[in-house]
Image (cartoon, grey):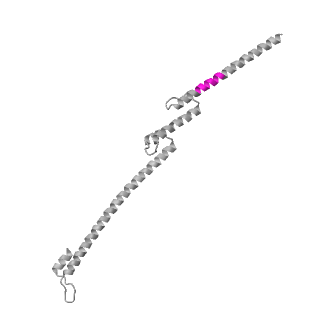
Amino acid sequence: MSWLKLGGGIAGLLALIGVFLWAKATLEKAAEADAYRACERAADSPVDPLDRCPKNTRARIDAARRAALCDTAIGADATKVDPYQVRIACSAPVKAIEARAAVAEANEADARRQLDIAHAQTDAAVARGEARAANLANRKADNDRTIATAPRTADGRVRCDADCLRQLAD
């Protein structure tokens, strides 16, 4: 009978250890669930600390927060980019793309300015050429009239006297 008492005591002790292990596992799962919920609440807020989150989850949430800030800096339509916010919030590839876009925009503005200058110079040159051509046409017409009114010799040649030469020189 002593074996029976000893066996019953050992069985009771093993059952008690099993209950303790089961309770410990249940408490650990509850603590993990609480930590998960706290991490989830912190992840939903852009400013709450992520102390209760696992390390890899913390890194992912930080990346998601930076991405949200970067999206805000770029803007919904990507036409109003805030370069200072991009430098603060965005990753290196996004910064490189934004820098290339800014350089392209500056190059386009410079090309437009140079085209405007070239158009203005061309317009001025055309105006000068037209004025010169009109002046030459007027001078030629005046000279033709002067020669037409000049006295003629018997053989039909124009005899240009001093008055005729003065008129042609003017």
Which residue corresponds to the image point at 44% horizontal and 50% vertical from the top-left?
A: 103
Q: Main secondary structure of the magenta part?
A: helix
Residue 10, position in %: x, y? 77, 15
Q: How far from the left and from the top, in percent, is residue 118?
A: 36, 60
* Residue 81, picture quadrant: top left
Q: Residue 128, percent across and down?
A: 29, 65
Q: Which residues are magenta?
A: 26-35
Instruction: State the residue lying farthest toward the left.
Output: 163
Q: Between 161 and 149, which is closer to the camera in this rendering?
A: 149
Decide: is 26 above or below 127.
above
Residue 57 lies in quadrant: top right
Q: Is 30 covered by the magenta stretch?
A: yes
* Residue 74: image location, x then y, percent: 46, 42
User: Is 163 displayed left or right of 65 in the figure?
Assistant: left
Q: Nearer the viewer, residue 153 or 59?
A: 153
Q: Is residue 50 visible?
A: no
Residue 18 visible in the shown view = yes
Eyeballing the image, is 155 above or below 138? below
The quarter of the displayed image where residue 161 is located? bottom left
